[in-house]
Amino acid sequence: MPTIRERLDADLKDAMRAKDEVKLTTIRAIKSAIKYKEVEGANKVLDDAGILGVLTSEVKKRREASAEFKAANRTDLSDKEEKEIVVLQAYLPTQLSAEQLTAEVTRAITEAGAKSIKDLGNVMKIITPRLKGQAEGKAISDEVKGQLSKLG
């Protein structure tokens, strides 16, 4: 099974050959973000987990940008961001469905012995590493808050 870095390199070459501008610019941008993260930190070469973190961050940035462009009636730029998100998601693990997320959060709440919203931090410490790359942090946090608020 090739690493994410190897897949990015191979897909970059394929995008060049196919003259797929969206894929080409998106992969170049993500490779640049990965390189920046490697230079910035003490860790010289990011492993797959580190690259997943960068990919997740880049998807989040593009979602926020897309929402801003939609709010400003710039559908052309919003569409561009959405296309880039699709390219980036090909490198992320399959995202959890709403039902799967609910089940995972319920399990984490049980493990943490959480009784109220005050236990949010404890639950997040358990579930965030477990679901890294499989769900966005905001979605996880919203689900945890929702379930904890029902408890008391």
Image: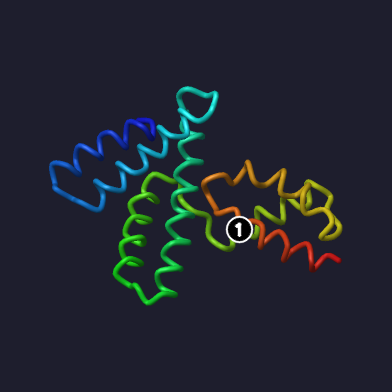
Viewer-closest of 44 and 53: 44
Q: Residue at x 20, y 37 (%)?
A: 13
The answer to whether 53 appears left or right of 77 in the picture is: right
Q: Quadrant of the N terminus?
A: top left
Q: Residue at x 33, y 55 (%)?
A: 84
Q: Is residue 13 above or below residue 23?
A: above
Viewer-closest of 48 and 108: 48
Q: Is residue 55 above or below residue 135?
A: above
**Image location of residue 38, percent across then percent down:** 46, 29
Dot 1 falls on a residue whose secondary structure is helix
**Image location of residue 98, percent across then percent down:** 57, 63
Residue density around tag 1, few if under 14, some if 14–19, many if 20 or more, within 10 Å: few
The answer to whether 136 appears left or right of 31 in the picture is: right
- Displayed quadrant of residue 35: top left
Q: Is residue 28 above or below residue 109?
A: above
Q: Residue at x 36, y 67 (%)?
A: 78
- Displayed quadrant of residue 55: top left
The answer to whether 31 appears left or right of 118 in the picture is: left
Find the residue positioned furthest to the bottom: 73
Q: Residue at x 62, y 43 (%)?
A: 130
Residue under numbered circle 1? 138
